[in-house]
Amino acid sequence: MLQIPAWKRISILAVCLAGIVFAFPNAFYTRVEQHNDAVAEIDALGATPEREEAAAGWPSFLPATLVNLGLDLRGGAHLLAEVHVEDVYSDRMDGYWPEVRDALVGIRDQVGFVERLDSAPEGTLQIRIQNAEAMPGALEAVRALAQPVVSLTGVGARDIEVAGDGNVITVQLTPEEKVATDNRTIQQALEIIRRRVDEVGTREPTIQRQGENRILIQVPGIGSAAELKALIGTTARLTFHPVVSRTGDPQAIPGPGNIVVQDLENENEYYIVEQAAVLSGEDLVDAQPTFDQNGMPAVSFRFNPSGARVFGQYTSENVGALFATVLDDRVITAPQIREPITGGSGQITGNFSVESSTQLAVLLRAGALPAELTFLEERTIGPELGQDSIDAGRIACIVAFVAVLVFMVLSYGLFGVFANLALLLNVGLMFGVLSVIGATLTLPGIAGIVLTIGMAVDANVLVFERIREELRTAKGPSRAIELGYERALSAIIDANITTFITATILFVLGSGPVRGFAVTLGIGILTSVFTAIFVTRLFIVMWFERKRPRTIEV
């Protein structure tokens, strides 16, 4: 019997309705996008009248999911940046100096005085000891500081190599540690750029590594490459330094091993700090706005285990001293160490407002770029070009759609009309799924949609042709329709599974536009099979139950 249970009918209609509802916001793209941006900014940065007005532009009871438009459709900025990973080598050596100094001071009776040489080559640490005869013991003490390389390719290697020449000890990173450091630097730069570009998670940027030390950055909706560069920043490393003194003279002579750094808020105030940082932003894992014991805004922070150990030891030995947080060669804050901080967390207090403490927490949490960036390629894709792409894709979709609709009606009559209705629902379901998963639509993605429209009726063609064959054997209409669906099912599944496997391979092995094409093609296959097997059949069954025809013509 040609019938579909009530629960199955309700399920099919519910799926179709859900797809249309979730696809509906794309018809009001600008309003919904402004609403989403405002809601995200309110959650992350707080409410303002402008943000609340934008958030009220779309009803809260309706879905607000959108298909994100890619760079080629919306316009935006494209940058290719090179990361100066060598900068990190010098920072690592600066960080090693206090440990090396302490190790050599422990055997001062053998080596005599210890002095760091400022003329050392970039990325190396050179120390002069007084007694050249004690060089073997000094080398042994410094080599004891070496740690295993933390990487899969550097198993069994140490992070530093130590050599002696006369009374000069040279310390530098091993090749294995340089490779591991480069990888960590690029990954950290990727994450920090992502946080700076997309702090509230609404821009859908493309940020990925290219080659050994380059990063590709593409952000839809940005007005120019210059705006994107300003958003990212080009240098800046977050470091924590001991404060030697304060001064109002920018020309003050800092003394050996010290530097002069300007205050971020008060441009007339300067700090003389030690050049060697106690900790860097790599050791900071979290920062949150909070309030101190007096109810004033403050910032709480937390270090990783190694940073917590160093921080606890330093604060225990320097209670009462000032400790500067330096970002972009400017002192963010320089609080006084009031007590030892041994738990790996602490609090920055000062003349903060709620807003400034929140901004500082975001800044500390995002961190600073670990190395300088050089922009090798800059491109701005205007919205006009994106609009041209959208218009061309729209024309292609409409032409393909109309051609398929006309062909189906001319070939299969009323059954072709049912297939066309299912095709309309198929497109709605496709955009609904793309919206729910937050997919980014590019020009190749539109090509995948056009191809899906052409393929969507393939399953219906197989079914209808099979029904025609069954009608020729003098079977009744009901039995012919039922057998048509049953005997065409294997061919439908086989054809679509092979295409879906191809789309999966393209998604796994491809990147960028290829993956966008694969996503739309794969989703289109799933929705077209659903509409052909279930939706079109439901239409035919409902029509057949109402008309009860003695004969049918397909």
Image (tube, rainbow, N blue to C red):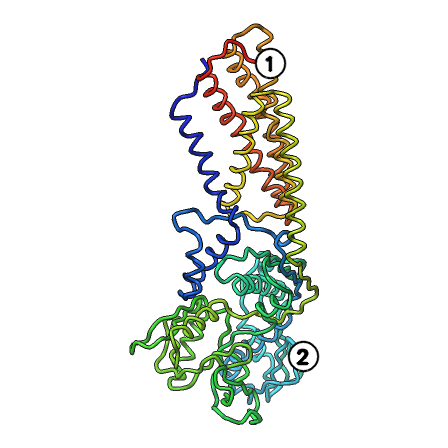
- Number of residues whose C-alpha sits closer than 10 Å to that of mark 1, classed few (under 14), some (14–19) or many (20 or more): some
Residue 35, compared with residue 312, is above or below; it is: above
Q: Which residue is mark 2?
A: 121
In what element is the residue under mark 1? helix
Where residue 403 appears, x then y in whole percent? Answer: 66, 31
Residue located 64% across and 36% down the image: 451
Residue type, label 2: Pro
Residue type, label 1: Arg
Q: Quadrant of the C terminus?
A: top right
In what element is the residue under mark 2? loop
- Number of residues whose C-alpha sits closer than 10 Å to that of mark 2, classed few (under 14), some (14–19) or many (20 or more): few
Looking at this rendering, what residue extends furthest in the right direction? 376
Residue located 39% across and 78% down the image: 352
Q: Of label 2 and label 1, which has the lower sequence position? A: 2
Residue located 45% across and 62% down the image: 41
Residue 450, compared with residue 156, is above or below; it is: above
Query: Is there any visible trace of residue 509 in the rendered image?
Result: no
Q: Which mark is residue 5?
A: none
Where residue 370 appears, x then y in whole percent? Answer: 57, 70
Residue 310 found in image quarter:
bottom left
Q: Which residue is mark 1?
A: 468
Where residue 112 appears, x then y in whole percent? Answer: 55, 89
Query: Is there any visible trace of residue 516 in the rendered image?
Result: yes
Looking at this rendering, what residue extends furthest in the left direction? 294
Q: Is residue 410 left or right of residue 244?
A: right
